[in-house]
Image (cartoon, rainbow, N blue to C red):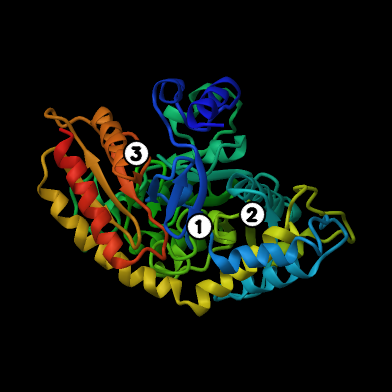
Amino acid sequence: MNTNQYRALDRQYLWHPYSRHSAIQENEFPIIVRGKGIYLFDNEGRRYLDAISSWWACNLGHGHPHLVQALTDQAPRLQHSILGNLSHPGAIELAERLCRLFPDKRRRVFFCGDGSSAVEAALKIAVQYWHNLGQPQRHRFVAFSNAYHGDTLGAVAVGYLPEFHAPFQSLLFPVFRVEAPFCGLCARGLQPDSCGQACLAPMAAVLSSHAAEIAAVIIEPLCQGAAGMRVYMPECLTKIAALCREHGVLLIDDEIAMGFGRTGAMFACEHAGVDPDIVCLGKGLAGGYLPMSAAIVRAELYETFADKPADHTFYHGHTFAGNPLAAAVALETLRIYAEDRIVQYARKAGEQLQAAMAPARDLSGVHNVRGLGMLAAVDLVDCNGQPDIARARRIAAWLLKQGVLIRPLGSVVYLMPPLITPEAALVQLAGQLRQAIAENV
């Protein structure tokens, strides 16, 4: 079939996630047929730099020969086997490797299918943990405003964004929602080096007043992604962890977007010296090649789920949890992260990306330029200082014609390229984004 035939069938049968009807009906979107390195290719041979790592997942780029080989080697041996009362080598080895990535290695890995399901598992584990201890009243959560933790109902409850989730508000359980830190545009006009993390006073107040009914605090570490790449300092995360310890509340760290090197550390929580009670992983876990996620849980929590003398079994699971194909690719992904020093490269290359984006501060209609590791973001405003969503869409369309794929978040345009992107390509990419901003006013 040619491109027009594919588009016609697409418009007749396919429902695109997070995509406006008009964008599909009116635009000549690419039909992607292959990927190699940092690029995607459409069926007409055009090349696109994947500047968002295919929804923040393909950290090692596309078509990595070792990941493809790991999948090819595993495919004829074992394609799927449940983890209910059975096991297989891939899940066992991967669980061990993941636990060894944390300071406290006495952990258990609960495999899931995608990021939302890992968050759902983490929320239920936290609530049942307190139930197991005879404190069922501790079933509430504290979450940040502007948070995003996925699109299943539990994840939406703690990560409610009105522009995404308003139709489902009546289905959600109540959450203590508190002000989120955003050091790039501090709501109090303070400076990070002297603010004393004043923005966390609301969280401290909620924990002080309601700890007896709170199961856990859940956070996106150092950056609220879907809210518009709202970056905050490690000192905030350090204080959040201290508040949780002070009040005996669990800390759930959602590393699905920021984990596996994106921030210049294996996990964002490392910047703050924090070792959370539950860590949610996904996206880059299997290199973005296959759906796989996990909730990594401290052993002392796991041990309360014993079935003797009372049955505290965690009756929760996913059909494809720990899938052998995904596990094989994830094991190879972790090996590449370590042996190729991907995280160290991302830290160094991230500095180059931030330097290359700095001149964008002088462009018209740019309100805030910020970054964190291999992530850079720009807020766009109109002449009245209001978010300029239409301009962000024009910039994305302009860049697509230049062979660069981005997806704005409202009026925020951002770059999250694969961690293997050469420094020269990063500089060129930043230059293309600056040009797009300058030419689309």
Please state which amino acid type lies under the numbered disc 2.
Met
In front here: 427 or 116? 427
Q: Position of residue 208 (x, y in %)?
A: 46, 51
Q: Earlier in the sequence, mark 2 or mark 3?
A: 2
Res 427 label: none
Q: Position of residue 238 (x, y in %)?
A: 40, 64
Residue annotated with mark 3: 408
In front here: 73 or 390? 73
Q: Earlier in the sequence, mark 1 or mark 3?
A: 1
Estimate the spatial distance between the alpha carbons at disc 1 and disc 2, rounded to whole Å: 17 Å
Helix, strand or loop under label 3: loop
Q: Earlier in the sequence, mark 1 or mark 2?
A: 1
Q: Position of residue 434 (x, y in %)?
A: 19, 48
The residue mark sitting in front, 1 or 3, is 1
User: In what quadrant of the picture does the N terminus appear?
Assistant: top right
Residue annotated with mark 2: 292
Residue annotated with mark 1: 62
Estimate the spatial distance between the alpha carbons at disc 1 and disc 3, rounded to whole Å: 22 Å
Estimate the spatial distance between the alpha carbons at disc 2 and disc 3, rounded to whole Å: 25 Å
Helix, strand or loop under label 2: loop
Q: Residue at x 40, y 39 (%)?
A: 146
In front here: 126 or 441? 441
Up-down: is 204 above or below 161?
below
Task: Report the side of 258 relative to 179 (left or right).
Answer: right
* Disc 1: CA contacts within 10 A as few (<14), some (14-19) or many (>=20): many
Q: Which image quadrant for residue 137?
A: top right
Q: Position of residue 98 (x, y in %)?
A: 62, 69
Helix, strand or loop under label 1: loop
